[in-house]
C-alpha cells in the first residue's frame, strides 16, 4: 500500500511540474515495465504451474473438427440484480441483431466449434458449456432467483452427475435447434400446422394420417419456451444459434420474445389461456413459463401476465372435502373436490416458480397441495392418481397399448412434497425413490416402454432427493436412474444427418401421452429432462 501511494504522489508531482515530452516518456517507461512483469509472470507460470483456465484463442481447424458437438456462439450480457425490475423498453426498440463473428462470408451449413465447449476443458472439469451451464449466456452469478442454478451437477466424465454433460448438452442444443426450426411465424408452436412448416424445407416430422388438436397450443408453446428459459435465456438474450441443417442463424432472445408475446396475447382478462375440458394443463404451463420469464429477467413485460395467470390458478384450486382448507387441482377449475396428482403437480411447479420470482402466492394454496399429496399416498412409496385406494394401479386413457409406469405418480408425489415441505427426512421420499428405480428408463424393441412424462418427473424428483446437490450422499437412486435416463433419451433423438434436415435434433418417437402434442411435446419435455442438472436449485438447502 505504501509503495502504491508513493508512486501515485510521484506521478502527480511529475504531471504538475514536467513538460509534456517528459510526461510522455514516463508513461511509456511505466507501460513497458508493466508489460515486462506480465510477460515474465506468465512465462514462468506456464513453466512451473499447471494451467487452470480455458485458453480463449480461436480454435484450430483440428479442434473444431474434433468438437463433440457444435455449441452456441455467445455474447455476455449485463447482469440484472435480483428482485429488481428492468426499465421497460418498447419491444420495437429491442431489435437484436445477429452476432457477426467475422467479416468473411460464412457457410452456416458447416459444423461450428466453440472454444468454450466441454471438449476444451481439462479432464475432470465441472463441465460448463455455452448452453447456459457455464460461462456462456446463462446467468451464472447474475442474481438469478433460486429456481435456476445454471450449472450441471458436477463431476466431469466420471463425476456424480453420471455420464459427461457433453452429450446431454449437445442433445439440448440440437433439441433447441429443432424447436427454433418449427416455431410458427406468430411465435407459437402449434402442432396442427407442423406438416405445413416441415414442408417448407421438404421434411416430415409427423406421419400421414396422424391428427392433433389445436386447443393445446398454449401449453405446447409454454413447454417449448421453458426449454430456453430453463437454460438461462430470456427475451433479452443476444446469444445466437446456427441451425446447420438449414444454414440459418437465430437470435435466442428473439425466439423467446416472440413466444412470450404470443402466449401473453392469448391470455384473457381472468388470466386463463383457454377454456375447455382439460384446460388446466394449459393454464399451469402458461403460468409456469411467464413466471420463469419474469423471474429470469425481472422485466415488467411479464409481471402482470404472470400475476394474472397465478391468480387464475389460485382461484381454481379445489376445496378440501373435509370443509377445512384447500386441496389439489383437476382438469377444470372449481366445482367438486375431486383433484388429481398430475395436474396438481404442474400447478405446484408454477406456484413455486412464481414465489421464487417474487410474486405473491397464498400459503394456504401450498398447504392445500401438500395435504392432497399426503392424502393420495398409498403404501410402500406408491401414489394414487385420484385417491389412495388406486395407488400403484394403472391409469386408463388413450394409447393404452403403451406400458404404464406406476412410478409416475410416485415421482409427482415426491416433487410436491419436495417443493412445498422441503423435508428430506420425510420417510415417503426414500420409499418412493426405491419404488421408482425398480423401473428404470429403457427402450423396448416395440418402443412401447417409452414414457417421456415419467422420465421427466422422475428425473426431477430423484435429482432433488439424492443428486449431486442434495444433502444426502451416495447417489443411491439418482446415479443408476441418470445413467439409464440419458442413454434412453439420447438414443431416441434424431441424429441421422442423411435423413431430411427437418427432423434433425427432434424426438419423433411417440409415447403414451404425446397424442396431444406429437414431436413438439416430445422434443420440449426431453430437452427439459436433459436440463435437470442445472434448472432447479436443490430444495433441501444443501447449496
Image: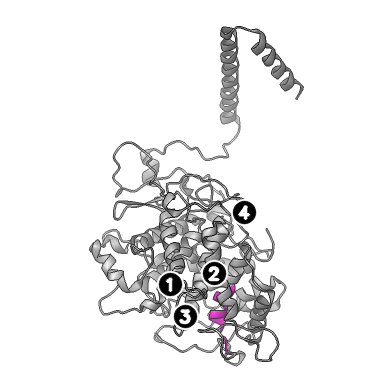
Q: Which residue is mark 2?
A: 459
Q: Look at the image and tell me in which quarter the C terminus lies.
A: bottom right
In the rendered structure, are the residues bearing label 2 and label 4 in contact, judged by CB atoms less than 8 Å apart? no
Q: What distance separates the C-alpha of mark 4 from that of mark 3?
A: 33 Å
In the rendered structure, are the residues bearing label 1 and label 2 in contact, judged by CB atoms less than 8 Å apart? no
Question: Tag 3 or tag 1, which sits nearer the N-term?
Answer: 1
Name the residue nearer the viewer: 362 or 478.
362
Q: Can you tell which quarter of the image residue 46 is in?
A: top right
Q: Can you tell which quarter of the image residue 207 is in?
A: bottom left
Q: Nearer the viewer, mark 4 or mark 3?
A: 4
In the rendered structure, are the residues bearing label 3 and label 2 in contact, judged by CB atoms less than 8 Å apart? no
The correct choice, above or below, for 295 with respect to 7 in the image is below
The verdict on residue 129 being magenta is: no
Image location of residue 155, percent across then percent down: 58, 54
Left-right relation of 49 to 305:
right
Q: Look at the image and tell me in which quarter the N terminus lies.
A: top right
Q: Which residue is mark 4?
A: 84
Question: Tag 2 or tag 1, which sits nearer the N-term?
Answer: 1
The correct choice, above or below, for 78 with respect to 542 in the image is above
Q: What distance separates the C-alpha of mark 1 from that of mark 2?
A: 24 Å
Residue under the image location 45 percent in, 49 percent down: 238
Q: Which residue is mark 3?
A: 279
Q: Range of the magenta residues?
A: 338-348
**Helix or strand or loop: what does disc 3 sit on?**
loop
Q: Which residue is mark 1?
A: 218
**Helix or strand or loop: what does disc 4 sit on?**
loop
Name the residue nearer the viewer: 221 or 140.
221
Crowding near the residue tagged with mark 4, few <14, some 14–19, many ≥20 C-alpha atoms within 10 Å: some
Amino acid at each position: 500500500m505504501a509503495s502504491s501511494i508513493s508512486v501515485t504522489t510521484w506521478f502527480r508531482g511529475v504531471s504538475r511540474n514536467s513538460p509534456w515530452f517528459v510526461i510522455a516518456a514516463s508513461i511509456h517507461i511505466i507501460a513497458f515495465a508493466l508489460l515486462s512483469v506480465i510477460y515474465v509472470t506468465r512465462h514462468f507460470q506456464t513453466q512451473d504451474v499447471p494451467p487452470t483456465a480455458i485458453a480463449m484463442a480461436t480454435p484450430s481447424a483440428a479442434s473444431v473438427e474434433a468438437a463433440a458437438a457444435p455449441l452456441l456462439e455467445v455474447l455476455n450480457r449485463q447482469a440484472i440484480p435480483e428482485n429488481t425490475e428492468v426499465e421497460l423498453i418498447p419491444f420495437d426498440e429491442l431489435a437484436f441483431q445477429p452476432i457477426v463473428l467475422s467479416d468473411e462470408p460464412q457457410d452456416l451449413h458447416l459444423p461450428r466449434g466453440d472454444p468454450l465447449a466441454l471438449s476444451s476443458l481439462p479432464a475432470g472439469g465441472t463441465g460448463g458449456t455455452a448452453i447456459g451451464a457455464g460461462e456462456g449466456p446463462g446467468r451464472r452469478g447474475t442474481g438469478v432467483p433460486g429456481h435456476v442454478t445454471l450449472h450441471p451437477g458436477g463431476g466431469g466424465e466420471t463425476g456424480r452427475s453420471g455420464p459427461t454433460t457433453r452429450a446431454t448438452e449437445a442433445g439440448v442444443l440440437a433439441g433447441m435447434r429443432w424447436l427454433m426450426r418449427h416455431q410458427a411465424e406468430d411465435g407459437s408452436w402449434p402442432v396442427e400446422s407442423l406438416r405445413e412448416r416441415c414442408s417448407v424445407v421438404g421434411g416430415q416430422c409427423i406421419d400421414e394420417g396422424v391428427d392433433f388438436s389445436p386447443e393445446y397450443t398454449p401449453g405446447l408453446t409454454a413447454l417449448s419456451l421453458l426449454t430456453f428459459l430453463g437454460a438461462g435465456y430470456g427475451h433479452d438474450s443476444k446469444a445466437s444459434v446456427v441451425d446447420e441443417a438449414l444454414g440459418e442463424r437465430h437470435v435466442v432472445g428473439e425466439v423467446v420474445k416472440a413466444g412470450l408475446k404470443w402466449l401473453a396475447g392469448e391470455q384473457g382478462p381472468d388470466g386463463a389461456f383457454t377454456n375447455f375440458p382439460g384446460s388446466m394443463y394449459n393454464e399451469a404451463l402458461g403460468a409456469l413459463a411467464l413466471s420463469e420469464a419474469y423471474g429470469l429477467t425481472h422485466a415488467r413485460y411479464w409481471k402482470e401476465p404472470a400475476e394474472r395467470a397465478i391468480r387464475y390458478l389460485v382461484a381454481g384450486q379445489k376445496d378440501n372435502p373435509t370443509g377445512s382448507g384447500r386441496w389439489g387441482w383437476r382438469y377444470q377449475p372449481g366445482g367438486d373436490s375431486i383433484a388429481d396428482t398430475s395436474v396438481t403437480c404442474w400447478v405446484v411447479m408454477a406456484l413455486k416458480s412464481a414465489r421464487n420470482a417474487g410474486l405473491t402466492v397464498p400459503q394456504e394454496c401450498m398447504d392445500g397441495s401438500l395435504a392432497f399429496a399426503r392424502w393420495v399416498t398409498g403404501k410402500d412409496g406408491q401414489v394414487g392418481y385420484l385417491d389412495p385406494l388406486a395407488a400403484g394401479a394403472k391409469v386408463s386413457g388413450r394409447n393404452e397399448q403403451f406400458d404404464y409406469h406406476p412410478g409416475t405418480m410416485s415421482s409427482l408425489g415426491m416433487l410436491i412434497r419436495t417443493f412445498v415441505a422441503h423435508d428430506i427426512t420425510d420417510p415417503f421420499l426414500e420409499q418412493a425413490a426405491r419404488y421408482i428405480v425398480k423401473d428404470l428408463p429403457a427402450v423396448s424393441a416395440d418402443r412401447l416402454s417409452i414414457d417421456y412424462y415419467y422420465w421427466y418427473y422422475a428425473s426431477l424428483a430423484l435429482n432433488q432427493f439424492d443428486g449431486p446437490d442434495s444433502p444426502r450422499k451416495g447417489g443411491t437412486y439418482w446415479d443408476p436412474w441418470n445413467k439409464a435416463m440419458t442413454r434412453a433419451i439420447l438414443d431416441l433423438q434424431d441424429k441421422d444427418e442423411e435423413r431430411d434436415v427437418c427432423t434433425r435434433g427432434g424426438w419423433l418417437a411417440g409415447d403414451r401421452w404425446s397424442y396431444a402434442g406429437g414431436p413438439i411435446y416430445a422434443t420440449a419435455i426431453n430437452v427439459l429432462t436433459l436440463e435437470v442438472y442445472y434448472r432447479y436449485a436443490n430444495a433441501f438447502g444443501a447449496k
